[in-house]
Amino acid sequence: MGDDEINSSKKCEKNKYNVIIIGGGVAGLAAANHLNNNGMQDFIIIEARKRIGGRIIAIPMKHHRVELGANWIHGVLGNPIYELATANGLVNIINVPKPHKVIAATEDGKQVPFGVLHEIHEAYVCFLRRCEEYFLCQYLPPPDIHSVGEHINLEAAIYLERLPSSEEKKLRRLIFDCLLKRETCISGCNSMDEIDLLELGSYTELQGGNILIPSGYSRILEPLTKNISPDKIMSNHPVSKIIWNTNGNSDDFGDESEDSDQTVIEDISKTSAPDQTGQLNRPSVESEDKPKKRTHLVEVHCDNGESYYANHVICTIPLGVLKDSASTLFEPSLPQYKMESIERLLFSAVDKIYLEYERPFLNPDITEIMLLWDNASSTESMADSWYKKIYSFTKVTETLLLGWVSGKEAEYMETLSMEEVGVTCTKILRKFLNDPFVPEPILCVCTSWKKQPYTRGAYTAIGVGASQSDVESLAQPLFRNVRDKKPVLLFAGEHTHSSFYSTVHGAYLSGQIAARRILTPDIAPENELECPGSADLNAWIQGVQIEG
């Protein structure tokens, strides 16, 4: 054995673990905690960024600390993130929501009567709930209606037909349009015309509303990391290759198992085939061509030249990155059904715009300004119209406003300087508030989730033609061969939870599920039924019936 092989062998033993978790976001941290809490500490987290947390991050502004990623805990009942926050004193069990006064204004600075705004909001919520019913009730929509946007626009048109005045119709139509823009930021898409109508109800909404952590959402990372030793987190290690079958070339792999819902890659180089005499051909023990048996099943190579080895890998790489690099990241390639699901699901840009001021300038009672833009002309360039996708500015504090923008317009905004965005937002506020003295912000901070190389978007949505089964396909673990009791390659992240995709609690639960699968005993304990004596048999049967 040469020096290079000896050094390689030593490096392999040094960097060998039972489990490698790729990604230090919530899914990866949840998996690590579950392994740790169950006595399995032979794992490592490999994170591409110089920090952990994934799409949870806060940064300081001049007078505020702002959350660039996850903002709310979505729901209370059955939400592990809410339970974690409560257990660590991050939220008050008794949540008293602050009064929320919304005003809506048109481009000429006129404020819409609250009664009109309330009327259209109620109608919109009703239309949206009807869209969700298609998934729950399994009935068919009207012909040629395939998306949520198409369905809501149809209902809105029917709703507005009853109004005699064209001005009344136009104003209410602008409110519907504003609410649809808001929905693109909630769903994570460019237009609600992209969201599959039959699948909208596949997302399960937990009861309890949206909860803010007063000290900031990123505080949830503290309880998630406090029990993980720092030496188990390898940050600044972008992964370049995941070799999840180390026993042969990709040409040696068979098809998926037909008698299982688990994807199995069979190494047929190990199987025995009869020769012409009927005798089984077995590899010769003395054969020099016989590959050396490895003690690991998966290899993970990083951009910095480091390599790590494991029996199992939990891959929590975001869907946006998988869309960009799945075809070259995995060796052998992922099964075709996974690649097709990655292609069908949406992972668009959703960005925040924070505007910080030296002094308050809005009425203290107002908490949100809805922007009722006239419909952009089809001939307008993106440079002249991107900001019309901003549907509102919400007051975070008296001196901090938050705006949202999604889709292609968000991608365009990511190409601009924050100073340019701040100037544009000032013009918008002066226009809609009809106040030329609205001050310029002392600081503007914008997110750029689409441009971020280790995210490439915001969160998962089910586009037209995709379905909940695509999310389930992404979650499906991969087995090296039919004899393996446990998978070698598992997947986690919000994009793998079929009911809670797009949420932090979905990511958290998916990480736990993957870790639990690895911890499952190789041999399940047999269920033994104690058989009583024949004299007591009748009493025993009666007892079972009573207990049942």
Image (cartoon, rainbow, N blue to C red):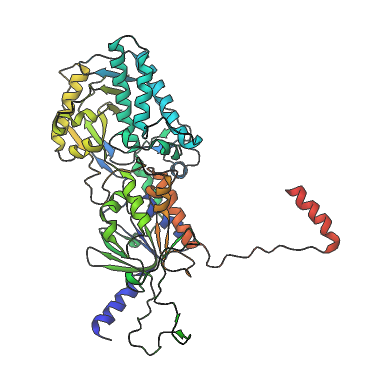
Which quarter of the picture shows residue 75? top left
Where does residue 180 sit, x and y in percent of width and height? 32, 28
Q: Give 418 or 256, whichever is nearer the viewer.
A: 256
Of the 4 image quadrants, the one containing the N terminus is bottom left
The residue lying furthest to the top in this view is: 164
Q: Is residue 16 above or below residue 409?
A: below
Whether residue 230 can be seen here: yes
Identify which residue is drawn at 25% across, 42% down.
59
The residue lying furthest to the bottom in this view is: 286
Q: Give 168 or 432, whichever is nearer the viewer.
A: 168
Which quarter of the picture shows residue 201? top left
Q: Give 325 or 55, whichever is nearer the viewer.
A: 325
Where does residue 419 sit, x and y in percent of width and height? 13, 34
Identify which residue is drawn at 38% across, 70% down.
297
Where does residue 253 sit, x and y in percent of width and height? 37, 69
Identify which residue is drawn at 41% across, 35% down.
211
Where does residue 134 sit, x and y in percent of width and height? 46, 34
Q: Is residue 210 above or below residue 458?
A: above
Q: Is residue 31 above or below residue 423?
A: below
